[in-house]
Amino acid sequence: MDKKNGIVIETQGLSKSYKGVEALKPLSLQVPKNSIFGFLGPNGSGKSTTIKLLLDLIHPSGGSATVFGFDTVQKSPEIRTRVGYMAQDQRFYGHMTARETLRFVAGFFYAGPKAEIEKRIDETLELVDLVGKADRPVQGFSGGERQRLGIAQAQVNYPDLLILDEPAAALDPQGRHDVLMIMERLRKHSTIFFSTHILDDVQKVSDTVAILNHGELVALAPIEELLVGSGNVVYLFTTIGDGDGIQTLLSDMSWVTDINRSGVNGRTQWQVIVDDEDAAEAQLLRSVQSGSEVTVTEFGRKKFELEEIFLEIIKESNHGNK
Amino acid sequence: MATNSTFVIVKEQGWRMGFANLLRNENLELWRSHRWIKQAGLWLLAVNGFVVINLFVLPAIILPDENVSSMMDPVSEGIRALFQIGTTALAIGTITMTQGKVIGERETGITAWILSKPVSRPAYFLAKIVAHSLEIIAIMVGIQSVVAYGLISLANGEAFPLLPFLIGVGGMILHTFFYLALTLMLGVLVKTRSQVLGIAMGLFFGGMLLPNLINQLGLVTPWLLPNILPVLALQMQIPFVTAYLPILMTAIWSMVFIIVALWKLPRLEF
């Protein structure tokens, strides 16, 4: 790993074009150690392209990337000794069993001792709940089982970096939950870089999210920051008592752009949109509380669902591209 | 890595990264299953079947006619069957069996999966060449040659001269290796299985005709080897250049195919 700054992946203007068509526009990002980095975007947005560039399966048209501080083009096999990768479309030798597949993959990393390798294979099979099918040929596996085997083979070598391309795409809700749990467990030892179009998964486990659209990075932020929303900031609070005074008070504030209120069971719920975050942070709660005739029972900044944020960002990006 | 201190780490570097594991896997696929027994049986039937027919069956059928009998030496015909028909059959068999070895894995995504591990691209290709060369030497040519040598010696009434026979066997291995290298290289160069098969078979069958139109082509290609090898094994008179230049050129072409594949592979995208 790059010891200077704890960055595992760093891209600088990394791009890829096919016959003049930009599959990935210059991309610059950093993935910190032990983070779960969600790489989000619609189909065809450039997620898999980025992953393949990091693994040197395809060659960049411009820019550069480093993994553990090593150039991905010059030092790719060395980088891959510390990486586990699961492709979007899992393909294995059909005649091999799950155990043989893991043994084959482990053989790229470990020369022995045999007993330890077998122990590790057993642990891995257990982790992905494939013990019962360990000795069956992979060609008879369902999509979900292949997906599990994909995760197993990606982490059999205790990778420092786990790259997962759509790890939960072919799974049922229980399977998806299990995969996310596995990712949570693995984060203790590994940095996880995963692509997905399932927003719920990203919201559940990611620390940082990057959103790609049409090959362009349109958002990059810690998940908490992203969920707060972009542009106008929205505050939600609930009061008991006559709120007319508050309405008047807020209307006079220059940084308040919109006020909505609704009453339920003697409580008033407020949604206040502001365009000056700093002013709102400093004054809004104090101003509301200063109205002696009301009691504030709840106060906070609105947290958006990732889906709302995602759709908004994609919409803006699509609009900007037109 | 986090918890791997108990393991002996693979220490291959450079182009050898992943080679040993890939070779082990290719060999396992062949030897662990009973595929090699089936293959050996098939080739025994295909190659030595013709040898037996020429050594024992045809002479028995046409023996009463003295004129024909005088023209047919069973041992010579057995040698021709082995090195002419056998070499031709092995080339077709090699193309058919290995046409999907590289392109098939490229098409299904297995190559991308393997290359996402600590594997150098040359190692990926060389493991296939080495594994299938062993297959050719051991099963396709080796076993057949031993059996054929026994049969020919039996028909000969004494041991057939070993050295010229081995020269023929060497030529047969080289001829088969040429089509192996060609087919695997095409798997790297082109994009579909049908292209691999079409070009390889086209070159093979074209090679049967072209030397008749341009004589010199026979000297710089393997196309006349099925005719030359029986002559060498039978120690018949043949100009040195006519006999050995095609063998040398076949070896050179095979190396060129490997070099081209090794040059192209790092430029491919998966």
Image (tube, grey):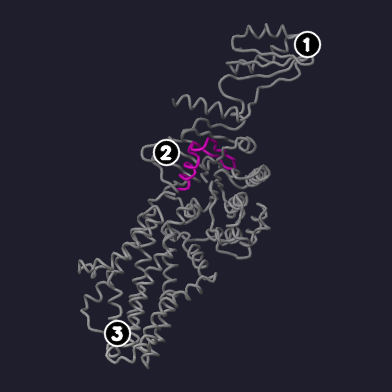
Q: Which amino acid type is shown beneath numbered disc 1? A: Gly
Measured in 3D between alpha carbons, the distance from the residue under mark 3 to the one under mark 2, in whole angstroms, is 63 Å
Decide which of B234, B250 is in the foreground and name it. Answer: B234
Indicate the chain on which mark 3 is placed. Answer: B
Q: Which residue is mark 3?
A: B234
| Dot in front, 1 or 3 | 3
Figure check: B196 above or below B79: above
> Which label belongs to residue A281?
none
Position of residue B86 in the picture relative to residue A124 (left or right): left
Closer to us: mark 3 or mark 2? 3
B262 sits left or right of B21 in the view: left
Q: Earlier in the sequence, mark 1 or mark 2?
A: 2
- Which quarter of the rendered picture does the C terminus of chain A lie within? top left
Secondary structure beneath label 3: loop
For marks 1 and 2, give the CA distance.
58 Å
Question: Which residue is denoted by mark 2 in the rendering?
Answer: A15
Q: Rounded to the nearest whole Å, what is the CA distance between mark 1 and mark 3? A: 114 Å
Residue closer to the observer: A90 or A244: A90
Q: Residue A223's image quarter?
A: top right
Question: Which segment is the magenta one?
Answer: A29-56
Give amino acid for label 2: Ser
Q: Is residue B108 above or below residue B136?
A: above
Helix, strand or loop at mark 2: strand
Q: Which residue is mark 1?
A: A241
| Magenta region includes residue A283 | no
Disc 3 crowd, CA 10 A, few/some/many (<14, 14-19, 20+): some
Residue A181 place in picture, x, y as percent: 67, 44
